Amino acid sequence: MDIRSLCRLPLLLLCRHRGLATLLVLEVAVGFLLLYLAWQAQANWQRARTAPSGIEETSLLVVPPMGRAATVVDVPALTQALRALPGVDAAIATNQVPYARNSWNAAVGDRPPIGRDRIASVYMGGAGLPATLGLRLSAGRGLLDSEEQVMAPGSPDDSALPAVITRALAEDLYPGRSALGLPVSGLHRPVRIVGIVEQAPLPLGSRGHATPGAAIFLPLRPGDASWAHLLIRTAPEQREAVARRVHDFLAARYPERPVAAPLRMDGMRLDTLHAERRWGWTTLACAAGWWLLTLLSLGVAGHLWVQQSALRISLHRAVGATARQIRFAVRWEHFLITLAGVGLGAIAARELFHRLPAPWTTEPASPWWLAGAALTIMAVAQVAATWPARRAAGVSPERVTRKPWVRL
């Protein structure tokens, strides 16, 4: 008997349980798909959390509407009093703010709004709203204080209003040409475009209604601050102190109204990303649970293989196979299973995920990520192989020699 050929054990145990090995390969492949999906979900969450929004969120505070009462809250007097508070750089009243739940939307353009076609989110906070938000003009000019007017739904004034719109809305209304000086139809009053900003976040209530990124800023301001949002700009490091001052000031000035604590704009943005964050943690939890089950399956399967092949392992030990060779054989089997599973999972991810609807759709992963994920999976699988490998190496060569049908 050639001991060298007998001691070649890489496929010794695997060839006897091909069905179980196939199930383990499929389990590793599904685990790779879940890991790929969890990575994509976490990447999408981080991208949504850190993507530029077009405004300076870290400098903004929002006071929710205080509610209606018998008296009207004078907007110029209130905003002037707020600007006088220490640390307040700007204060305005507006009909809506980015990331809030309420929204004002209007169908604009010449096409009829069939199926909510071309819906824009309408901001009316006066001439100072774009500057307070920190919007940057890419073309044209901003709104002027002399153009500011009070919102009056029943007003017979039909004069044209200047407007600043986002680039997304400008390209949708007038593709292939400049929108400056051109009208925006569909509103109650004539509107002409005087400026274009790169982008502006929409209220949460506009999601699913307004065209993505489509916003229009008019020089109209609320006539009563009780139903409007108060937008306050300050230095990022002074937000906590300014929030307390603003709340104490409003509570003392309007004791008959419920005054909520000012909200941080960056915190409001995070609140709008609950779906992305929930999906990221859900996929991560599913991947972690599946891989715990997979590692348990690999360990138990390896133990069963060793137990059922104990006599065969003992025979190899009796003819000269070392404990190191036995351990290598068990680890080699786990390596082949994980390698086949990772390869099958990578092929399935490439051919499957781009055909699925959101949020299952994923982007192609870089070769570095694929290599890192494959190496990590194989390393973890080798950890799971430690227990069965030790048990296999612990099989004594005398076990087979005690059998009456064995004659060495």
Image (cartoon, grey):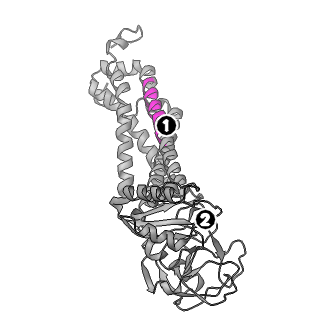
**Could you tell whether 325 is left or right of 278 in the image?**
left
| Secondary element type, mark 2 | loop
- Residue at 43% x, 24% y is 303
Can you tell which of label 1 and label 2 is closer to the viewer? 2
Q: Position of residue 367 (x, y in %)?
A: 37, 58
| Secondary element type, mark 1 | helix
Q: Say which quarter of the image contains residue 6.
A: top left
Q: Where does the C terminus fall, quadrant-wise?
A: top left
Q: Where does the N terminus fall, quadrant-wise?
A: top left
Using the numbered discs, state the Cα–Cα distance from disc 1 to disc 2 in whole angstroms.
48 Å
16 within the magenta span: no
**Could you tell whether 204 is left or right of 284 in the image?**
right
Q: Position of residue 277 (x, y in %)?
A: 49, 51
Residue picked out by circle 1: 289
Label 1 neighbour load within 10 Å: few <14, some 14-19, many 20+: few
The amino acid sitting under disc 1 is Gly
- Residue at 43% x, 81% y is 137
Tell me which secondary structure the magenta stretch mostly adopts.
Answer: helix
The amino acid sitting under disc 2 is Trp
Q: Position of residue 66 (x, y in %)?
A: 57, 59
Q: Nearer the viewer, residue 359 or 376?
A: 359
Residue picked out by circle 2: 227
Which of disc 2 and disc 1 is earlier in sequence? 2
- Residue at 66% x, 87% y is 157
Label 2 neighbour load within 10 Å: few <14, some 14-19, many 20+: some
Q: How many marks?
A: 2
The answer to whether residue 364 is visible is: no
Find the magenta span and give its range: 287-303
Is 306 located above or below residue 267 in the figure? above
Q: Nearer the viewer, residue 387 or 51?
A: 51
